[in-house]
Every structure is written in structure tokens, then in C-alpha cells.
Image: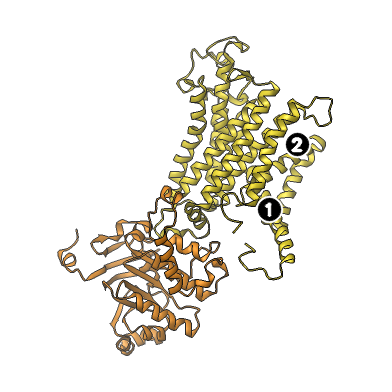
Amino acid sequence: MANTGIFNRSALVFLFALGLAAVAVPLLNLVVPSENVLHLPDYLVTLLGKYLCFALLALSVDLVWGFCGILSLGHGAFFALGGYAMGMYLMRQIGARGVYGNPNLPDFMVFLNWPSLPWYWQGFEFFPFAMVMVLLAPGLLALVFGWFAFRSRVTGVYLSIITQAMTYALLLAFFRNDMGFGGNNGLTDFKDILGFNIQAAGVRAVLFSLSALAVGLCFIAARGIVLSKLGLVIAGIRDAEPRVRFLGYRAEHYKLFVFVVSALMAGIAGALYVPQVGIINPSEFAPANSIEAVIWVAFGGRGTLWGAALGAIVINAAKSWFTGALPEAWLYVLGFLFIAVTLFMPKGLAGSFAGWSNLKKTSATPLPTPEMAE
Amino acid sequence: MIPPDVKQNGETLLYLEDVSVSFDGFKALNKLGLDVKRGEMRAIIGPNGAGKSTMMDVITGKTRPDEGRVLFGNVDLTQHDEAAIANLGIGRKFQKPTVFENHSVWENLELALRSNRSPLKALFWKASAKDNAKINDTLELTKLEDLRFSRAANLSHGQKQWLEIGMLLMQEPELLLVDEPVAGMTDSETEKTASLLKTIAGKKSVVVVEHDMDFIQALGVRVTVLHEGSVLAEGSLDAVQKNPRVIEVYLGR
């Protein structure tokens, strides 16, 4: 059947669109002269790059929620932790160019009269170390949190509430100056990444393409997971958890596996987000951010992966437009969208697309088999 | 820990002794004892609230007994959880047919297929020709060959019951616990289910909980009557139906 396998039609269309964007956006920005109508201004490159990071976050939420039924309302925490790990590297890259000109300490530490770099900042001047931390920090949090939660068989609304509590606790912790992460100002004023000027158009374009690449690779990995037997098991956990246990599968181990993989993806998204927006602060831990990510997934189509990514891009594009044109209206629009999707498009954008294309197929072929409708 | 008399008796597969469970003061099981031989099929009957499902829960690790011993061969089941007990070789069919509705019939059987249950093994698992043959055999046995690619949600109630029994067989358990396998089935389906279970028994031990007396008659096996969490009577169906205490419980005081 054409509709199975990692690279089915919708997956190929999605990957093609990503690949096209990864090539076209930098070209339109760097090669096409600025007088030309086709020229893409610098700010749009970063904006689109930001959308891709959100798309990756949505993908990670869809993996746990859409396929394993774990409604995490705290995925923003993994995103933010990945972002902080990248931010720490970028802070160390500033060196003596800070306001206080201290070669060893970031500005906020000089301001707080800290004598030396705390132990947990050691090593972040090395890019490979920072990249390991981008994965390790969210991955470890997900592992420890998930181990306790899933082992105690916390499910449903209760799990959602404690994920929310987790990200809120981190929000409060990161607000504190003595945590050593810049308090409520967070980490900003970045200069270089790997020796290249982070503000330069070329670097921005590369970051955009890397974001597209990350979305594409994580999408393929997620497809591989959900189509494997492990994918069958996690969907089984979503639909009938006791049945899975009585078949001899340890549901908690499976949940832990997807939860950690998903947290790693969210961490990568955060790490790509920070150099593009130029700041990471505790507000990224805000519960509202995590809830918004869930809305992107519901809007785009839960359990479809590409739909979740599309939902993130569409809603954030709408948000950019509305907050520019009608700033007061945005929250109402978001609320309305969520209600409308729940009522009229329970399978989201992706489900509606599939419905329309099936409708066309059904009218073309007189006798559809039940399997084809799937 | 395990008394020698049980250890030496190789015939017994499942052994319950003085098992008690209470929920908020209500005694669901009250010093229940049960002894199922290897290869034996046993029918369990009893009015609502007699403790049939609680007994299943205790054996499969869903509920911890307050006291008593539950042995499967030489293994103390009270020390294990559902997944471990399933892997020891106990399969369970629920009262309400519980299959994976969003998965195809084939995928349901594939999930149940005996295999390494660790997540990483599952991630890289590929069906071998032998696995496919096993699934095909079960499809044939449960008469679901033509529905192999259908979503389980589209099956009739009886077909779901059969799929769940098929999943049980894929696990290759030593002991099958079957809760109301013919509820909602037509007479001919009931008949087929009885003959299916009879072919399984002999090779495996089967414990069937059922209300349908005709079905139990058709099975023709030893019957245990539960009442208020303990064994009221045990013997052939005819014998227990003539038992005055059983009549009293079933027909009211």
C-alpha cells in the first residue's frame, strides 16, 4: 500500500516543502538583491526560523500526546532547557566584549559581584560540550520526571497537572538571581556562534536551514518510531493501557522512552531558537507557552506529525500578523481557533486535508474498500 | 517459603490458598482456595459480586491480596506485577472485549505475539517468516482471515471476543484466564467458541468465567461455584446444580 512506510505521500510532500524552504529562503535573502520584489528581508529569515523551531516543539508534543496519549503541559520546559544550554555557550562566546569587559564572567555575574564562574558553567565555552548539554539537560529531566511519574502510574489529567507544575517550578527557580542563569533578564547580548557574527545575514540563513534540517530529521525519526512495533505499543498504551500490560509490556518503560525522545527533540528546538531570537529568559518556562504548543498540535492534527508542525507554523504566522495589526484581538482569535477546531475539525488541519482528498478519491472510485478509507 | 507438598505436586499449575481481598471493608475475596491442574479447563460461576473478577485481578497482578498465597508453578504471583505475570505465561481475556481498536486485526496479533518485550527490541523488531506463519495460523483458527487488514474497531462484538482469544493464543501462555468469552455472541458463535476452547485445553490450562450455563454444559468440565468471595461448591455441572446451597444462592433465600 502506498500509504504505509516512513516515506508515504504526505511525508514526502512535507519533507519536500521543508527542503525547498531550506534552500529557497537563504537564496531569496542573500542572493536576490534587496530592490527585487522577491527579496526576503533579514527579519523574515529569523521569523521563519523561529516558526521552524516551534514546529519542532509541536512535533515533539505530538509524539507523546498524539501517539502515546501523554498530554504534557510542560514541554516548554525541555525547550527552554535546550535553549539555556545554547545560551550559556553563547554567553561564554562574548568573552571580554561585555559591558563590564570581564573576560571570564558574563555581565550579570559581574553585576552580582560573583568572584568566579560557578561549577555548572564550566565547560560551556566548548561548543561540543554545550551541544551535549542541549540534549542532556532536557533528556535527564524527562528521564527522572518520567521515571517517577510513569512508575507511580500517574496518568491523564493528573499527569498533565504535574507536568504543568514542573515547568512552573522551573520558571520560579530560573527567575532567582542566585540560580546563576541571569535571573529574569535571562541570557542575551550574544555576539558570536562558532566565531561567526550571530547578527550576520549569512549566519542567520545557515541557522534557518539548520532548523529546517532538524525538523526534517526529527520528523523522519518520529515516523520511524511510530511505525515500528514500539509505535504500535505506545498507540496501544494510548487506547487500552491495561491490555498492553496484560500482554506483558511494561507500559512505563515505553512511556519513558517516548517521553525522553520527545524531550530531546524539544531541547534541540530550543537550542536552535535561542541564537535566532537572541535571548533566552525564564518566560520560556511559562505554563502558557506549553499550553500554546498543545493548541498548535490540536489545530494542526493530533497524531499526524506533519500536521502538528504545520499547525505550529500557521498559528505562529497568524500570531505575528495579529499582534502587529490587531494586538488586542490575538488571544480572542487563539481561543476562538481552539474552540472552532475542537468543534468542527476534531482531526485538525491534517485530518481535514485527508478527509478532502479521500472525498475526491471516493467520488472517483465507485466501490471504496473500508481499508482505503483509513 | 513454598511448602513441600505444593512443590512436589507437579500436577498443579495454579494454586490459591486462603486468599482474601477487601475494598473499604467489603470482602471481595474471603479465604478463597483454588487448584487448577496443568492442562485442565475449569469453569467458574457465581452470582454478581461473588468475586470472580477480583480473583482474576489477583492472579494477574492487578490487585494485591491482603493475605493468602497465589502460586503459579513454583512462583509466588503476589510478588510480581501485570507485565511480569503475563511473561511468566498467564494470558487474560477481559470481560469487556479489550482489543486495540485503532490497530488492524493483524497488528493486534503481532503485538500479542510472544517476543522480547523491551522497548529497544520492539523499536527494531521485524516479523520473521515464522512469526507471520503463527499469525496466519491464529487468523485461521479464529476465522478472521478475511478481516486481517480491518481496524479492530470495525469488528462485531463476537469477532472482537475471538480476536482477543486469538491474542491470548499468540502469547503462548501456560494458563489462560477467560472472562465471559461468549457474552454477546450468537448461539452458533457460542458453539464455535466452546469447541475452540476445548481444542486449547489439554495443551494449556484454561479458567473460564461464564454465566451461560448452556456454554458450560457444552464445555463439560469441572465447575467451581463462588459466592461472597469463597468457594461454595465444586464438581461437575450436574452435581453443583443439584447442590442445595447453590440452588439457594442462585434462586434466593
Between A368 and B1, the one nearer to me in the picture = A368
Chain of the residue under label 2: A
Pointer 2 residue: A320
Residue A343 quadrant: bottom right
For residue A348, which numbered disc appears in the image?
A: 1
Position of A43 relative to A234 (above/below): above
Residue at left offset 44%, top offset 50%: A252
Chain of the residue under label 1: A
Chain A colour is: yellow
For residue B84, which numbered disc appears in the image?
A: none
Most extreme residue toward the front, as rendered? B129
Task: From the top left corner, tell me how far across and down residue A94 is, in percent.
Answer: 59, 16
Residue at left offset 70%, top offset 23%: A201
Report whether residue A287 is seen: no
Between A146 and B67, the one nearer to me in the picture = A146
Position of A172 relative to B113 (above/below): above
Q: Secondary structure at mark 2?
A: helix
Position of B171 relative to A298 (above/below): below
C-alpha distance separating marks 2 and 1: 21 Å
Between A268 and A15, the one nearer to me in the picture = A15
Q: Quadrant of the C terminus of chain A?
A: bottom right
In the image, taking residue B32 as reference, residue A144 lies left or right, namely right
Q: Which chain is orange?
A: B
